[in-house]
Image (spheres, rainbow, N blue to C red):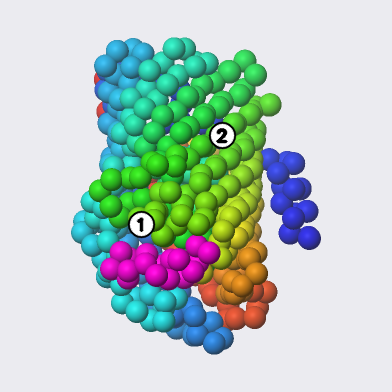
Amino acid sequence: MKKYFFFLFIVSLIYYPISAQTSAQDTTFKKIRLGGYGEMLYQWMDYGPDRYKGDGAPKDKRAYISIPRAIFAIDYKFRHDIVLGTEIEFEYGGTGAAMEFEYAEAGEYEMEVEKAGEVVLEQFHITKSFGSIFNIRVGHMIVPVGLTNAHHEPIFFFGSSRPEGEMTMIPCTWHETGISVLGSFSKIGLNYELMVVNGLDPNGFSKAEWVRVGRQKIFELSTMTSPAFVGRLEYSPVKNLRIGASGYYNKSAKNASKPEKMTSVKGKVSIVTADAQYASSNIVARANFIYGNLTDSKRISELNRTVSSKAGFPRTDVAKNAMTYAAEAGYNVLSFFNTKQKLFPFIRYEYYNTMEDVESGVTKDTRYKRDILSFGLNYYILPNLVVKADYAMRQIDNGTYNDENTFGISVAYTGWFIKK
């Protein structure tokens, strides 16, 4: 219970202006603009990759270096009120299928099959503006469920990696195809977005990642037999403060790769989120909360074990409920000096559990209950160029299993390079 009161306390305190891609109408360019964002990451870990042994991950020392994502964006105005928005994402510096060793699935090698490999069309949409209050967007776009999806650029979180709970429990960055209505009531500081997009595939649900792998990226076509409904509100009652909330609902069973196997279930996915941020020149504090519910989780777990391994789906149990919450805060210590650069020492706490609660007959695996305490530095050389370093201490099921510690360094940027 202390954790819940901790979260509510932070939320009561704690914003950042809505990102350019979510903005209903942008007047900062006349015809075309080119830009993007990206990250380069080094991570050192003191534990082995097999986290599913009897006592948890064995002690080990290993390190990785990668380019998690490089995004290139082009926006074009057909007319002042009709805008094409595009983003192409390169994940981990390459294309093609990847071989993975799945420790959670009895140590099997598994080919990760991805539509378009690791080059992803993250956004491709056309927005018709009727003014700041009402706009219509059609195409492939960001699903703004949770703080990180709504504000996913790397300058909008402190850690060297994206928040682990959000990245694990739901797709991140989450992008789907459909139609959206969005706008801004600037006088009262309110932004809104309502969406109808393609839903999730329950064959991808699992105990380790809840509904995250249910995002339809394996096959060429995305099933929309049962669409998903999404909504997000952001409210800025005072300067520097933003409070956000979002919701997601989808009857996923009809979107399954083989829907004839799912006729006995509905697989309703309901997700609610709350987040807040205070961001002045020298003080930044953020908090977020996500809670998800899945109906028919036991039956879906049973049916998923009958899916062919060639499809690349996890084929494990899935929980009825999953949850994550987190809070972070930092202060610019260079504010005492005559410089435009910023240095934020920060601290962050995060909890997540992809098996928060299960239906009777589904085994609750407590290895997925994790508390993470992180601290580090964010050095902003420029407002849109940051060097990050952090140390994260991960506790598994309140210490029942071996602890996991990670040290990370990253360089991240975001911005528009050309505007005409």
Relative placement, left or right, of 170 versus 222 is: right
Q: Residue at x 51, y 37 (%)?
A: 229
Q: Quadrant of the N terminus?
A: bottom right
Of all residues shown, which one is farthest toward the bottom?
54
Q: Residue at x 40, y 49 (%)?
A: 255
Q: Which residues are magenta?
A: 299-316
In 3D space, how far apart are the residues under numbered discs 2 and 1 (Cα atoms)? 31 Å
On the question of residue 160 being in view, the answer is no
Disc 1 marks a residue whose amino acid type is: Lys
Instruction: Specify few, some or many for label 2: CA neighbours under 10 Å numbering under 14, 14-19, or 20 or more.
Output: many
Q: Residue at x 58, y 47 (%)?
A: 271
On the question of residue 4 being in view, the answer is yes
Give the x, y percent position of residue 356.
64, 63
Determine which of the numbered discs, if any, sits on residue 30 in the image.
none
Q: Which residue is mark 1?
A: 258
Instruction: Specify few, some or many for label 1: CA neighbours under 10 Å numbering under 14, 14-19, or 20 or more.
Output: few
Give the x, y percent position of residue 237.
68, 26
Q: Nearer the viewer, residue 326 or 348?
A: 326
Give the x, y percent position of residue 390.
51, 61
Disc 2 marks a residue whose amino acid type is: Arg
Determine which of the numbered discs, if any, sits on residue 232 in the image.
2
**In the figure, 33 relative to 145: above or below?**
above
Relative placement, left or right, of 249 versus 2 is: left
Report which quarter residue 294 is drawn in. bottom right
Q: Secondary structure at mark 2?
A: strand
Asked if labels 1 and 2 touch by Cβ distance under 8 angstroms, the answer is no
Relative placement, left or right, of 211 versus 258 is: right
Q: Nearer the viewer, residue 359 or 94?
A: 359
Q: Secondary structure at mark 1?
A: loop
Q: Nearer the viewer, residue 352 or 186?
A: 352
